[in-house]
Amino acid sequence: MSRVLVVGGGYVGMYAALGLERRLAARGDELVLVSPESFMQYQPFLPEVASGNIEPRHVVVSLRQVLRRTRLLVGEVELLDHPARVARVRTADGALRDLPYDVVVLGPGSRSRVLPVPGLRERGVGFKTVAEAIYLRNRLLSRMDVAASAADPEVRRAALTFVFVGGGYAGVEALAELEDLGRAALRFYPGLGPGDLRFVLVEAGDRILGELSPALAEHVRRLLEARGVEVALGTRLASAEGGVIRLSDGRGFRADTLVWTAGVRPHPLAARSGFPVDDAGRVLVDEFLRVRGLEGAWAAGDAAAVPDLTTGGLCPPTAQHALRQARRLARNVLAALEGRPPTPFRYRNLGQLASLGRYRGVAEVLGLRLRGFPAWWLHRSYHLLMMPTLNRKVRIALDWTVGLLFPRDVVQLGSLHHPREAFERAAEE
């Protein structure tokens, strides 16, 4: 009996396990998935979680419910001793254990690429998880509460200033959805006006949304600026110490909220374990998704340098590619176990989609450029189709339907981030 170890419960981990578990169970082999969380989150919907259009639980999928023939181990693989075929795992209770395996599938994903900017670690928040999306929604609304009751104009201005660093998809979509929520919430704050909200997008490059065509990216920039967003191109965050944002163009101002979306880096597990990696830390794989030079090791997703046979470069770290890589990887692992030749991974990108708030978006699909409502509708339709499980598809569709019939919910539950605070205060009294 062979044991196949899948590392990571994201796109690669979940879809690879789905493709493997039935055939492995029929063969009498064991499939084990190790993930820090017991769920897979669908990241393209995080901006709509932040704006309140989608209930947070509806963009996560329980791995235990989906993977019925896979043994799930909640924890994190700290090291892979591949010559000995042993993984060192720190489980949810904090204990270390050695887990033997015969074949390993690496899909640990990526982490935020945090630069050594003074004050960033203390003041910044990322935008890669459901928890961060929930936090930012509560943060926006709680800062509006602070501003509505503040007598000091400096406190008011700082509370209503939101800085996003990074002009890729994550930064632009998160800013656009939160700005949309903030504008909609103003009707419930009689003392605040549209001119009080300040959103600043900081991008080191010469344009935002580098994945889109220059013309469409420029359209997005103009659209954001028409909504009052300050777009600072060719600019870097120099410091965030003491809540004062200092930019490389010389500007300085106070801001209570700093969102860091300036890129990601591969999970360090492969490099730490002595696997072959490129200069960026991505594990090197061939066109069959096999780790180069290592028998019985496979990898895909953000943490892998996967050759793109359609362009000659490397596959971009997108959900489209990760999902399809995982499915091909599962077939190739089964082929290897059964003595059949593997098939190379080949996928042509269908296009790019971006949501910019309710009824607004941009898209480039099969050479066709769309703007406004058609792009927004296409974005929602595509990602609803790609969302795992019928259960979650239906729940998200119902969330959207309710959102069309009723005004936005502007309740903020910031106390969720400090659940013991009320109890501790009562104990002190």
Image: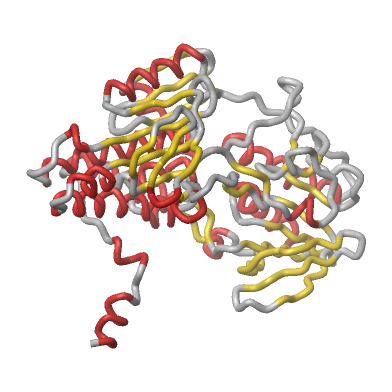
Depth order, front residue of 386/132: 132
The part of the image, by quadrant, that contains residue 321 is: top right
Look at the image and tell me whether residue 326 can be seen.
Answer: no
Depth order, front residue of 65/417: 417
Depth order, front residue of 132/114: 114
* Residue 226 location (% of width, % of height): 28, 21
Most extreme residue toward the left is 190
Left or right, 274 with reference to 32: right
Task: Name which residue lies at 52% across and 20% down.
Answer: 206
Task: Name which residue lies at 79% across and 48% down.
Answer: 298
In the picture, which quadrant includes the N terminus? bottom right
* Residue 132 location (% of width, % of height): 43, 53
Q: Is residue 380 above or below residue 409?
A: above
Look at the image and tell me whether residue 143 can be seen.
Answer: yes
Task: Name which residue lies at 76% across and 21% down.
Answer: 312
Left or right, 34 with reference to 187: right
In the picture, which quadrant includes the C terminus? bottom left
* Residue 331 location (% of width, % of height): 75, 44
Left or right, 117 with reference to 228: right
Q: How many marks?
A: 0
Q: Is residue 376 above or below residue 193?
A: above
Image color mode: secondary structure
Left or right, 367 with reference to 273: left
* Residue 89 location (% of width, % of height): 72, 69
Task: Name which residue lies at 48% across and 19% down.
Answer: 364
